[in-house]
Image (spheres, rainbow, N blue to C red):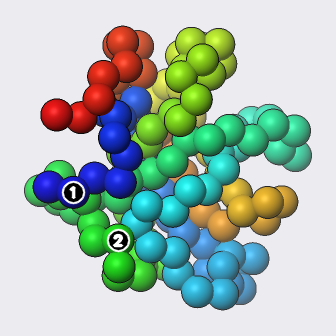
Amino acid sequence: MHRPHRVVDDFEAVIRIHTQAEGGRRSPPLNGIRWDFAYADDPVPNRLYMIWPDFFDADGNSLPGDVPLPVDVELRARMTVVVDEMRSEVHQGRIRVGVKFYCQEGPKRVASGVVTRITHLHDERTPLG
């Protein structure tokens, strides 16, 4: 199974990619996209974080990285906090089931999501085997 990130995920989420009419992208993204992450309860995102999705299917397999992702449907994703220090300094205290967030490309909100499950956020970081 190919996964776009080389470490275990920190949490899972459901993400809906916005349509172009909602201000989303002109073309759908591919799995492996490196969006910025913003907490929905923060005032107009004053801080963005590198937390990247790995979209997966009902069997837990990563979606292909060469097929456009569907827009305006809920997609399941494994989320990886890229900067290790931020895991303990920020995200371990903020990420909970039910937390809402946005995926950003610069100042543009291109997707929205909600945390559905905590996986390895509070564990020591380990590479994928």
- In the depicted structure, whether residue 30 falls above or below residue 3: below
Residue 116 makes an appearance in the image: no
- In the depicted structure, whether residue 119 falls above or below residue 69: above
Residue 74 horizontal/vertical position (percent): 41, 64
Residue 128 makes an appearance in the image: yes
Q: Quadrant of the C terminus?
A: top left
Q: Are marks 2 and 1 in contact (CB under 8 Å)?
A: yes
Q: Secondary structure at mark 2?
A: loop
Q: Residues within 10 Å of mark 1 (few under 14, many from 20)?
A: few
Q: CA distance from mark 2 to mark 1?
A: 9 Å
Q: Secondary structure at mark 1?
A: loop
Residues 69 and 44: in front is 69
Q: What label does residue 2 carry, if any?
A: 1
Residues 87 and 97: in front is 87
Q: Is residue 20 found left or right of 82 in the rendered image?
A: right
**In percent of the image, x 62 and y 41: which residue is there?**
50
Q: What label does residue 28 carry, if any?
A: none
Q: Amino acid at mark 2?
A: Gly
Q: Quadrant of the N terminus?
A: bottom left
Residue 110 horizontal/vertical position (percent): 66, 67
Q: Is residue 26 found left or right of 125 in the rendered image?
A: right
**In percent of the image, x 78 and y 65: which residue is there?**
108
Q: What label does residue 65 carry, if any?
A: 2
